[in-house]
């Protein structure tokens, strides 16, 4: 932490005013991507069904990551680090549950549903998060993944979602 604070030219005390703990620092980039996902999801066309809206939003996030210099390989390395570090994995899973609640709220708002009564927004948000996580893990486990563009990551996510489509993508109206 001393090295990071020194690199950004602030004291550790100042640094930890921005981040509550080391896990939060490590997950900050991921948190930014998740915030971007929420913004992209809110902006999706109203006529899209919930699964298509989420697929479109995650596609936009990965396309934005792909435009960043060396962001794709760094993102994959972060997923590997999270999965191999128990404290990071616990922090990440806690945050993922909070993210699911927010995604469910957005889906419910888009569809005019009450998420306290209708379980579909929460269920789809949880399934969606799991599919994305499994896709990230599968891609990170591919020894050649770091040599591929992020198009490969998007293709893998799309293949996983295609398997969900018949079960979950029907209209809710």
Image (spheres, grey):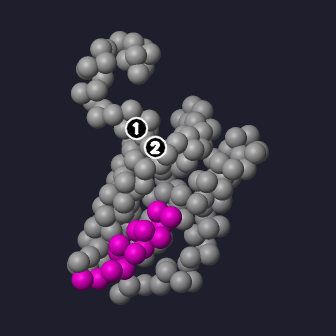
Residue beneath label 2, please?
88
Q: Residue at x 42, y 54 (%)?
A: 93
Tag 2 secondary structure: helix
Query: Percent from the top left, x then y, of residue 115?
Result: 26, 76
Quick check: 137 left or right of 60?
right
In the image, residue 98 sits, relative to residue 159, either above or below, namely above
Foreground residue, 163 or 55? 163
Foreground residue, 47 or 107? 107
Q: Residue at x 52, y 42 (%)?
A: 85
Q: Earlier in the sequence, mark 2 or mark 1?
A: 1
Res. 67 visible in picture: no
In the image, residue 127 sits, relative to residue 170, either above or below, namely above
What is the magenta range? 117-130
CA distance for labels 2 and 1:
6 Å
Foreground residue, 156 or 14? 14
Q: Do callouts 2 and 1 mark residues in contact (Cβ within 8 Å)?
A: yes
Query: Percent from the top left, x then y, of residue 56?
Result: 48, 62
Residue beneath label 1, please?
23
């Amino acid at each position: 932490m001393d090295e990071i604070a020194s690199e950004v030219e602030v004291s550790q005390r100042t640094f930890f005013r921005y981040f509550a703990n080391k896990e939060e620092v490590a997950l900050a980039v991921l948190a930014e991507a998740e915030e971007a996902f929420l913004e992209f999801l809110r902006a999706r066309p109203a006529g899209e069904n919930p699964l298509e809206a989420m697929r479109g939003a995650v596609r936009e996030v990965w396309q934005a990551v792909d435009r960043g210099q060396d962001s794709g390989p760094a993102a994959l390395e972060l997923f590997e680090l999270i999965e191999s570090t128990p404290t990071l994995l616990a922090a990440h899973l806690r945050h993922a549950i909070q993210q699911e609640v927010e995604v469910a709220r957005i889906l419910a708002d888009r569809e005019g549903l009450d998420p306290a009564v209708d379980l579909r927004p929460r269920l789809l948000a949880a399934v969606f998060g799991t599919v994305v996580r499994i896709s990230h893990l599968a891609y990170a486990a591919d020894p050649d993944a770091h040599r591929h563009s992020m198009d490969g990551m998007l293709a893998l996510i799309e293949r996983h979602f295609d398997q969900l489509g018949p079960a979950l993508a029907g209209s809710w109206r």
